[in-house]
Amino acid sequence: MVVQKKEKDTIFRVRFLEKPQGTPMEALVRQIEASNLPGLVCLSQFVFKDSTKKIILPEEEAAAKRFRHTESFHIPYHNILFVEEFVDEPVDVRELPFLRELHIEKGPTD
């Protein structure tokens, strides 16, 4: 069974436990499928966010380092914590609620 959307912008955020440390890892992929290896799930077509963006999340940076040269990744299905499906939309930094334009009033000059 292959989980893959026809829309090019659909991305899956997969959070899973990496053994033996048991630390949660997160990867962004375009394709999830049952592996040829029994009991495993195959993640492929890894997506890495633009490194020139102004806001860098630690999880994305760690995943980029870990999976930079990975073609596909087979993990036990019981290590998966959740799979989130979303459409990748460009973020306009000017529209973020915590950023707003600063208006400076100029006083009279002597």
Image: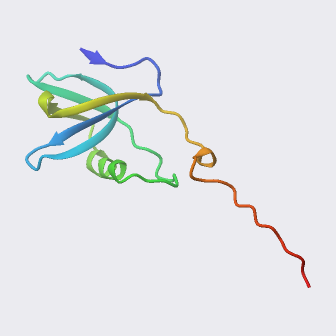
Q: How is the image coloured?
A: rainbow
**59 relative to 34, above or below:** below
Q: Is residue 90 left or right of residue 58?
A: right
Q: Residue at x 14, y 28 (%)?
A: 77
Residue 25: quadrant of the picture? top left
The vertical placement of 92 against 87, above or below, is below
Q: Is residue 52 above or below residue 78?
A: below
The C terminus: image quadrant: bottom right
Q: What residue is drawn where x is 43% and y is 53%? A: 56
Residue shown at 90%/80% (left/top)? 109
Q: Residue 38 location, x and y as percent? A: 8, 22
Give the image location of residue 104, x and y in percent.
76, 66
On the rendered structure, is 19 left or right of 27? left
Task: Kindly indicate the quadrant of the structure image that contains residue 36.
Answer: top left
Residue under the point 75% across and 61% down: 103
Task: Give the quadrant of residue 73.
Answer: top left
